[in-house]
């Protein structure tokens, strides 16, 4: 029986490491209810373009009515992902970046975002044996099942600590 | 002398359209002061991973001390860009997406972000003659001139309204 190395005792058995990743596995992270109050609060602070501030200005554009900043949609998505990652004690080390982020459809107050992710691939680090990285495709759909945002994220994660071989 | 078409009189001369874009032009959008209070507020709401919530948890990671969520850095960057875009009355129509977003270095409370952008290319829409798109490379540096984030954004923009030829 493999014992958790000293210093990791107690949580090593539940913590999820690089070795626990399953390529192709899909995770349903959860949902996020989009409110008008939060859409306006985020837009005033971070993206005060007219179509993110009022129905009247948005009516003159593709959006049609007040819609969330794309960066707000990304933040709400991260909230859903982070909640689960923290609860599951994934040994994540942050992200070096995002590829192919696409805002496909407007996100409106009253929408419910559904967030799911698929693990695309996983690569051990060459220079740092204690870690690896993986890529996931995140897809966000609204309550009608229509995709509103997708992106690919690169995530760094610890490798499972190994017990030193005994002499 | 070209006159602004009816309905655009008064602001058509200051509004910046697709035709006003200069490929290769670099814009200094401005700065954003990162505060500990805001870093914590954003992280609690949207990215509650331990290294974005306390110096103690961050000390055990690459970050070293409390650092901003990457999505928060993106939002603060958008705040700087949006302020200028709204002030200059750019005829923007939103963004379909972002490519190659990279979080290069941690962003810490007390940092000042400097945001600049370079227009990479501009393309008239084939299907919608009233609009076009352009791509910009956004670079965010801290107060020491060290790049902390870069991304390429795709932006939709109106074409300059033309006067109908008289009969």
Image (tube, coloured by chain):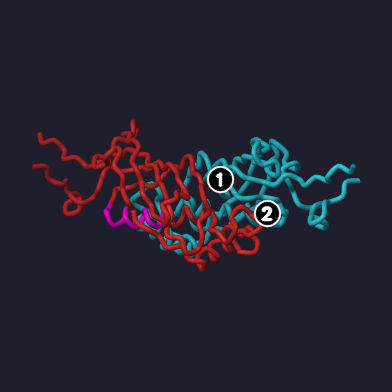
Chain colours: A cyan, B red
Residue A100 horizontal/vertical position (percent) = 51, 39
**Which image quarter holds the C terminus of chain A?**
top right
Compared to residue B167, the image places residue A139 above or below, namely: below
Q: Which residue is mark 1?
A: A96
Compared to residue A146, the image places residue A14 above or below, namely: below
Give the residue at x 67% y 46%: A157
Residue positioned most to the left: B1
Residue A44 horizontal/vertical position (percent) = 41, 62
> In the rendered image, is residue A107 in sight?
yes
Q: Is residue B101 left or right of residue B166?
A: right
Name the image quarter holding residue B136.
top left
Residue A143 horizontal/vertical position (percent) = 58, 50
Q: Which residue is mark 2?
A: A84
> In the rendered image, is residue B77 in sight?
no
**Which type of secondary structure does the marked residue at label 1 adopt?**
loop
Give how far apart the Cα atoms at labels 2 and 1 are: 20 Å
How many marks on residues? 2
The subunit letter for the residue under badge 2 reads A
**Which type of secondary structure does the marked residue at label 2 adopt?**
helix
Residue A6 horizontal/vertical position (percent) = 82, 55
Name the image quarter holding residue B77.
bottom left
Q: Is residue B79 magenta?
A: yes
Q: What range of the chain is rendered magenta?
A: B77-89
**Label disc, if present, on residue A128 of the rendered structure:** none
Give the residue at x 17% y 46%: B5
For this rendering, which residue is in front, A7 or A69?
A: A7
Give the residue at x 61% y 60%: B48
């Amino acid at each position: 029986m493999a014992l958790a190395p000293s210093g990791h005792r107690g949580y090593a058995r539940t913590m999820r490491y690089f070795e626990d990743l399953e390529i192709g596995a899909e995770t349903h992270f959860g949902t996020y209810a989009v409110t008008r109050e939060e859409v306006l609060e985020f837009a005033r602070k971070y993206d005060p373009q007219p179509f993110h501030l009022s129905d009247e200005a948005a009516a003159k554009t593709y959006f049609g009515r007040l819609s969330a900043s794309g960066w707000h949609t990304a933040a709400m998505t991260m909230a859903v992902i982070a909640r689960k990652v923290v609860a599951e004690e994934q040994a994540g080390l942050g992200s070096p970046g995002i590829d192919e982020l696409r805002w496909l459809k407007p996100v409106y107050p009253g929408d419910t975002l559904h967030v799911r992710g698929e693990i695309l691939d996983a690569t051990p680090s060459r220079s740092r044996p204690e870690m690896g990285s993986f890529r996931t495709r995140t897809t966000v759909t609204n309550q009608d099942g229509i995709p509103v945002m997708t992106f690919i994220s690169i995530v760094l994660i610890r490798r499972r600590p190994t017990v030193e071989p005994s002499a």
